[in-house]
């Protein structure tokens, strides 16, 4: 059985406490009138409640750490070296529509490096966690990225540009190229879980642009600790700043990156 460190236990307790409220709210969301006002307001309230619980629990355990949260923004702490990066509900649109695929994501950053991460799927009761130098785990089982070597056998995941966000012509060119070269592409609506699934070997790779730090911080560490590679789509290492990410196993990262670069170069210019 994997032994969790005190800091991972802090993160897990916070996630599990917030998850209880999300599960209760998720059970009610399908009963709401299907209108923009009702469900949207309800989900926003659920999101904010979960974030408040997470902030309280993390501050109680480490009161000097800073916090960056999706709804509340960033709050500096007395400790300049540590910061929590939190998404209380990754997969909000799924939640809104009663789809049971969403997660809580918590990462701990130390001096600019992610050193611990938790992604908790409360509906499936799957706890993905990782600590730098310790490995990545699903509940108590050690994770490894997939070992597939052939692109034509690979299953990839992605996220579509949302409304005005992202460059649609570029994405569509990338999607067409990947669909033609692989066994398939999935779009499940939660980047945190997509990255966790790469770490678990369920997906062979994942790419997306225009993400926020809280979408990917924990997932980046999960993939790395499971033996995978994570870069920007173009090959850089500033994923948290650019919002661009490509994660895959060590055999497929390079050919996927090449495929995406070629598609990007050939995309029509608006």
Image (tube, grey):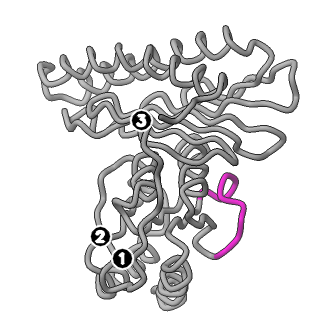
Q: Which residue is mark 1?
A: 175
Q: Which residue is mark 2?
A: 185
Q: Are marks 2 and 1 in contact (CB under 8 Å)?
A: yes
Q: Secondary structure at mark 1?
A: helix
How far separated are the C-alphas under marks 2 and 1?
8 Å
Residue 139 is labelled as 3
In front: label 3 or label 1: 3
Query: Which SS class for mark 2?
Result: strand
Tag 2–tag 3 contact (CB < 8 Å): no
Q: Earlier in the sequence, mark 3 or mark 1?
A: 3
Crowd class of label 2 (few under 14; some 14 to 19; many from 20; radius 10 Å): some
Residue interval drawn in magenta? 235-243
**Residue pictured at 24% horizontal, 24% vertical:** 39
Residue 254 versus residue 113 in the image, above or below: below
Q: CA distance from mark 2 to mark 3?
A: 26 Å
State the image quarter where residue 187 is shown.
bottom left
The image shows residue 10 at horizontal and vertical percentages of 60, 19
Q: Nearer the viewer, residue 59 or 150?
A: 150
User: Within the image, what quadrant is residue 32 found in?
Assistant: top left
Question: Closer to the camera, 193 or 74?
Answer: 193
**Is disc 3 placed on a helix, strand or loop?**
loop
């Amino acid at each position: 059985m994997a032994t969790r460190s005190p800091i991972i236990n802090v993160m897990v307790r916070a996630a599990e406490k917030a998850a209880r409220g999300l599960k209760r709210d998720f059970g009610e969301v399908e009963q709401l009138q299907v209108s923009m006002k009702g469900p949207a307001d309800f989900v926003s309230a659920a999101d904010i409640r979960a974030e408040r619980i997470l902030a309280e629990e993390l501050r109680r355990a480490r009161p000097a750490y800073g916090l960056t949260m999706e709804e509340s923004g960033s709050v500096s702490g007395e400790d300049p070296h540590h910061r929590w990066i939190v998404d209380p509900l990754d997969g909000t649109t799924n939640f809104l529509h009663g789809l049971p695929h969403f997660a809580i994501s918590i990462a701990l950053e130390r001096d600019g490096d992610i050193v611990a991460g938790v992604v908790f799927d409360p509906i499936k009761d799957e706890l993905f966690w990782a600590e730098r130098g310790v490995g990545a785990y699903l509940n108590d089982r050690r994770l490894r990225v997939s070992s597939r070597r052939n692109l034509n056998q690979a299953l990839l995941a992605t996220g579509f540009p949302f409304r005005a966000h992202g460059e649609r012509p570029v994405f569509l060119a990338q999607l067409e190229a990947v669909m033609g070269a692989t066994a398939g592409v999935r779009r499940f609506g939660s980047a945190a879980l997509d990255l966790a699934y790469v770490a678990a070997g369920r997906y062979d790779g994942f790419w997306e642009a225009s993400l926020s730090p809280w979408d990917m911080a924990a997932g980046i560490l999960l993939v790395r600790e499971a033996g995978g590679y994570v870069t920007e789509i173009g090959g850089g290492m500033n994923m948290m700043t650019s919002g661009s990410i490509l994660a895959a196993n060590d055999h497929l990262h390079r050919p996927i990156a090449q495929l995406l670069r070629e598609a990007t170069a050939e995309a029509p210019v608006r």
